[in-house]
Amino acid sequence: MARYSLPWLSRRRGRNRIYIIISAVLTVAIVVVLIYGLYPVSKSDDESVEILPETNVKEAETVEDTEEIEKEIIPPVPPLAAEVESEPNLITLASKPPTQTNLQMTELIAEAMALVNEKPGKVIEARDRLNDALLMPMGARQRAFVKDQLSKLVEHWLFSKSLFPNDKLCSSYKIKPGDQLRTIGQRYKVPYEILMQINNIRRPKALQAGQTIKVINGPFNVKVYRSTFTMDLYLQNTFVRSFPVGLGQPGMETPTGL
């Protein structure tokens, strides 16, 4: 049997194929839009890139500000010839169990404090005993206590007009005609300004012949300890007071020596 194809039937089948292709393309497009619309990967990446650098900048600014503040609060090293050395680790010594030396030191400190509390107080004897104690091994707390007590005694025997018997570091001097505070200070190896302070002299020219003033037998000297950033001031070999100091900087550390 012979088969005949009708023209209108062929055209209808062609249209159906086109509709099927178009429907498939639309379906794929919708699926793609839904996937990338729900999970926008590029957007999250952009946000992470923007946030992280801002955090790093804030941290860097904080570090720089802290360094500037530290530089401002560090006091300058006074223009004095100083002996710079490394102080022993006192914390390590204090952590050790009490020894016979520590017990002797405790008794010595107690005797010195008893001399201070006597009436009248024996300031010079107490000062000398506490100062000798600094040469002996002791714990950190004991050393800090001794230095603190010596600093308090300084207000009585050094930074005042009072003179004590048997004090080899302070004495009196009677002003002669032509004397000047500057030359008197050079004679006793101390700055003349401290003589003005302890004798309540407002102006150097106010010095009068026949006047008796208190003088100090110098010189002063200092010891600087790099490990604790402190400077100890001494009058001859007697401890006066401690001061915090700034020493060098990374790569340019203060060397030991004189």
Image: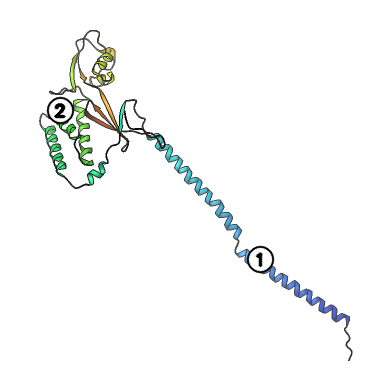
Q: Work out whether mark 2 precedes mark 1 in sequence or the reverse, and give the earlier one.
A: 1
50 relative to 176, above or below: below
* Residue drawn at point x = 28 percent, y = 12 percent: 205
Most foreground residue, 195 or 207: 195
Q: Position of residue 137 (x, y in %)?
A: 20, 39
Q: Position of residue 18 (x, y in %)?
A: 79, 74
Task: For mark 1, give the secondary structure.
Answer: helix
Amino acid type of the residue tagged 1 in the rendering:
Val
Question: How many angstroms separate mark 2 from mark 1 (CA)?
Answer: 95 Å
Q: Position of residue 79 (x, y in %)?
A: 34, 25
Quarter of the picture holding the C terminus? top left
Characterize the local packing of mark 2: few (<14), some (14-19) or many (20 or more) Cα atoms within 10 angstroms. many
Quarter of image, res 99: top left
Q: Which mark is residue 33?
A: 1
Quarter of image, res 94: top left
Which of discs 2 and 1 lies nearer the camera? The answer is: 2
151 relative to 9, above or below: above
Q: Give the side of residue 15 with respect to residue 98, left or right.
A: right
Which residue is denoted by mark 2 in the rendering? 124
Q: Position of residue 49 (x, y in %)?
A: 56, 52
Q: Give the side of residue 34 with respect to residue 166, left or right.
A: right
